Amino acid sequence: NVDSALNKSIDLKTFLSQWAIEEHISQSSLRSLLQGIKQYTCENCSLNIPFDPRTLLHTPRSSNVEICAGGQYFHFGLRKGILSIIPSLSRNITETKISINVDGLPLSKSSQRQFWPILGSVAESKEVYIIGIYYGTQKPSDNNKFLAKFVDEIKILHEEGIILKNTSVSCTIHSIICDAPAKAFMLQIKGHNGYSSCTKCITEGSYVNGKMCFPETNAQVRTDTDFRLRKDENYHIGHSALLALPNFDLVNNILLDYMHLVCLGVMRKLLYIWLFGDFKVRLQHRKVETISSELENVLKLYMPCEFVHKPRSLALVKLWKATEFRNVLLYTGCVAFKLLRKDLYHHFLVLHAAIRILCCSQFEELIDYAQELLQYFV
């Protein structure tokens, strides 16, 4: 049966190509496999398997990699990423809001080679797709050149939208989420160690024990208009390509990075103070062992399967991931840290309550109270 043989050939090629991509099979290994299949398959079975992995994977003969900002850049396309996600959604949409992330990614510990991907996701889906990627030995030397294709494409999509099933879908950038160094690069502002580096308030920091601190908790907030007019000369270091984004607020739509600020920032700092800090606040070795035992032998047993990382000993705190600091802040800490000195435990509970409110949408009416708690915590 010719049709049956053809379907088997297509199914096998699809399986092999997906398997090679998902399992990260090298070109040489895949080539050996394809040649082996050809060699040990009878000529009459009509599998039609190619010899070359480039044919199997439909690798383009040429690529549009261009020299850009001291490295190489390839633009996959914002439209292409959106079209790969929207058809799989369970409901029809007429508007999509896009979140963007940019960050540096070292390729190895023994060289300076790195990727700077521009990633996107739509509000209706958890899938993340690549919009563009930069490769070089350092971060892009020119913010405007690095973001040029992305900005140009979003301007076109904002004006024309995307036609899908005879329906026009409008596209807007809802937010940009980066860690502090990447945010400073994207906005072309002072780095997070600068005196005028706060992205939300017009305040001047000061060095305390060799670290930049911002003691003022009720400073004048920054606005999109002030940013565009560059009213704070000490804040800007260059012209950002993001200024050209349509209907985008360069203050309110640049979100704070919760993972680095809270989980890997404040919560880790608290634990380090309790474990390795001044003797006035440092936990006794006996209490550290008791808390570790509570985390590992008791609380671990009651952690639901949805928690990827189970509680680990405080002896391994330097190896903890961001999700582990998050778990101890939002869930296990209020039980495990009862052995802390009373004032330190109360101090932790203030942070716990504030972040818990901010993480739960059903507590939206308590946002002002969360702000008061955070000001009290500081």
Image (cartoon, rainbow, N blue to C red):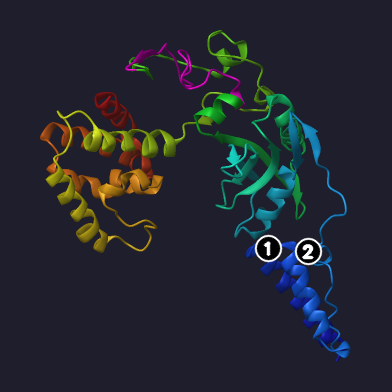
Which residue is found at the position 50% from the left and 29% from the top? Answer: 180
Q: Give coordinates of residue 95: x percent, y percent.
A: 64, 44
- Disc 1 marks a residue whose amino acid type is Ile
Question: Would residue 100 be seen by someone viewing this image from the given angle?
Answer: no
**Magenta part of the protein: which range?**
186-209
Residue 158 higher or lower than 125, as above or below: above
Q: Helix, strand or loop at disc 1?
A: helix
Are the residues at dot 2 and dot 1 in contact (C-beta closer than 8 Å)?
A: yes
- Disc 2 marks a residue whose amino acid type is Leu
Q: Is residue 192 covered in magenta?
A: yes
Secondary structure mostly seen in magenta is loop
* Among numbered discs 2 and 1, the one appearing first in the sequence: 1
Residue 264 higher or lower than 191, as above or below: below
Instruction: Find the residue positioned furthest to the front.
Output: 110
Q: How many marks?
A: 2
Q: Helix, strand or loop at disc 2?
A: loop
Residue 243 appears left or right of 327: right
Residue located beneath label 2 in the image:
57
Which residue is found at the position 80% from the left and 67% from the top? Answer: 56
* Crowd around label 2: few <14 · some 14–19 · many ≥20 (10 Å): some
Residue 334 higher or lower than 375, as above or below: below
Residue located beneath label 1 in the image:
21
Of residues 195 and 285, the one nearer the viewer is: 285
